[in-house]
Image (spheres, rainbow, N blue to C red):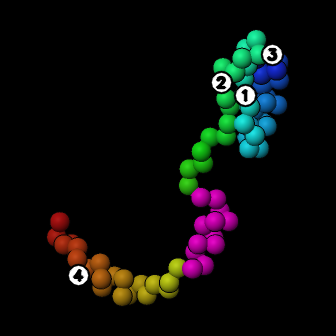
Amino acid sequence: MRELRNHGGRVLDDVARGHAVTVTRDGEPVAELRPAARRGLGAAELIARRQHLPDVDPAALRTDVDSVVDMSL
C-alpha cells in the first residue's frame, strides 16, 4: 500500500508495461493490478490482416448489395 500511495504513477507505469502488481496490507495480498484487456487490434495487426483480404470489385459489390436491399425503404 505504501509504495502504491507514494509512487502510484510509477506503479501504474509498470502495470501499463504489462507487469501485474499485487497490493498487500500488512503482508497479506488484498488486490492485484494488471493491465486492462485491450479492445480491438493494434495498427500493425490490422495492416497485416489487410494484406490477406481479397480484392473487391466495387461495381460487383454494388450489384450484389442492390440485389438484396430494398432501396424503397
Query: Which residues fall within the magenta stretch?
Result: 41-52
Give how far apart the Cα atoms at labels 4 and 2 are.
Answer: 56 Å
Quarter containing the C terminus: bottom left
Foreground disc of the pair 3, 4: 3
Residue type, mark 1 in image:
Thr
The residue most toward the left is: 72
Q: Secondary structure at mark 2?
A: strand
- Marks 1 and 3, how far apart at CA: 12 Å
Residue that lies at the very extreme toward the front in this rendered image? 28
Mark 1–mark 3 contact, CB under 8 Å? Answer: no
Horizontally, residue 65 falls left or right of residue 54, namely left
Q: Is residue 67 left or right of residue 46?
A: left
Label 3, residues with CA under 10 Å away: few <14, some 14-19, many ≥20: few
| Residue density around tag 1, few if under 14, some if 14–19, many if 20 or more, within 10 Å | few
Q: Earlier in the sequence, mark 4 or mark 1?
A: 1
The residue labelled by disc 2 is: 31
Give the residue pinned by disc 1: 22
Point out the image quarter for the N terminus.
top right
Q: Residue at horizontal 72%, vertical 17%? A: 28
